[in-house]
Image (cartoon, rainbow, N blue to C red):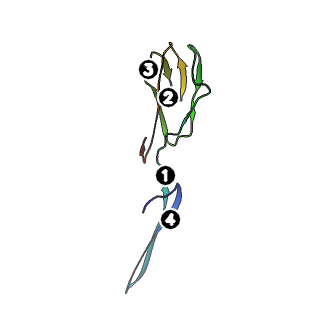
Amino acid sequence: MTGISAGTDRLVNIVSNSCGTDTFSMNIEVIPRAYAGPIEMPHSSICVGESFILSDSSIGMRFWSVSNTNASIISSTGAIAGQKPGLDTIFLQTSNMCGFT
């Protein structure tokens, strides 16, 4: 069985022989893979002392990080704050029981 899209499906197994037929069935939930969607920011820059919350369309648990913690800091909820002048890169990793991105 291969999951094609998220949702619930029913697995049915029917076994027959000369003595009769038996049936077993169960529901299976198909969960989407983790997906890190595009990061949406209200501005392309942030001032020292300013903060805002990033948004995204990701699927799964989110893990935010930045490459230059001297320039900015970011919380586990995607709230970013400018610390000092400089360039920074924001990273978003997602994970669920089907994997991580």
Report the Cα–Cα distance between label 1 and label 3: 34 Å
Are discs 1 and 3 less than 8 Å apart at CB? no
Q: Identify the mark nearer the N-term, 4 or 2.
A: 4
Residue bearing the label numbered 3: 68
- Determine whether the residue tagged by mark 4 lies in a helix, strand or loop: strand
Residue bearing the label numbered 4: 10
**Label 1: few (<14), some or many (≥20) within 10 Å?**
some
Instruction: State how many labels appear.
Output: 4
Report the Cα–Cα distance between label 4 and label 2: 37 Å
Circle 3: residue type = Asn
Residue occupying the point 53% across, 59% down: 8
**21 or 30, which lies in front?**
30
**Label 2: few (<14), some or many (≥20) within 10 Å?**
few
Q: Identify the mark nearer the N-term, 1 or 3.
A: 1
Residue bearing the label numbered 1: 31
Residue occupying the point 49% across, 58% down: 4
Residue bearing the label numbered 2: 76
Name above or below for residue 85 compared with residue 56: above
Could you tell me which quadrant the C terminus lies in?
top left
Report the Cα–Cα distance between label 2 and label 1: 23 Å
